[in-house]
Amino acid sequence: MSDPTLLVLASLADGDKHGYAMMDDIERFAGVRLGPGTLYGAITRLEQQKWIRPVPSEDRRQPYTITSAGREFLAAQVERFSRVVKTASKRLKHA
């Protein structure tokens, strides 16, 4: 899975993070290094969809949080991917 939208949502699912922290977290759990343009493009799209929002910070870095709508979207995508993985695993056993 390398969709930046889903990777950002998955990163924020366990707590607020700023961009650099998201990039590191995503690289750790997914093995994918998002470039700044890709990351901030995804953040912009996610904000437009109201799936994430910025949170106040006294630091110069801008942290983001996942919204309830973002959690619902992520949960639906996880369910969809789970069905695909389950089907693929069954089919590989018979191949």
Image: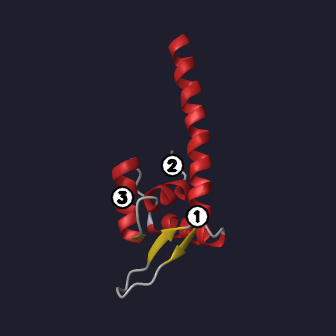
Does residue 10 appear in the picture of this structure? yes
Q: Amino acid at mark 1?
A: Ser
The amino acid type found where label 3 is placed reads Asp
Q: Position of residue 33 (x, y in %)?
A: 40, 56
Q: Which mark is residue 91?
A: none
Determine the secondary structure under disc 1: helix
Q: Which residue is mark 2?
A: 2
Coloring applied to the structure: secondary structure
Label 1 belongs to which residue? 68
Q: Quick check: marks 3 and 2 in contact, CB under 8 Å? A: no
At label 3, counting other C-alpha atoms closer than 10 Å, the crowd grade (few under 14, some 14-19, many 20 or more) is: many
Q: Residue 34, how many percent across, how many down?
A: 44, 59
Crowding near pointer 1: few (<14 within 10 Å), some, many (20+)? few
Q: What residue is disc 3 on?
A: 25
| CA distance for labels 3 and 2 | 14 Å
Which element type, helix, strand or loop, lies under badge 3? helix
Q: CA distance from mark 1 to mark 3?
A: 21 Å
At a point 58% along the width and 72% down the height, the residue shown is 44
Give the distance between the C-alpha atoms of the residues marked 1 and 2, in whole angstroms: 23 Å
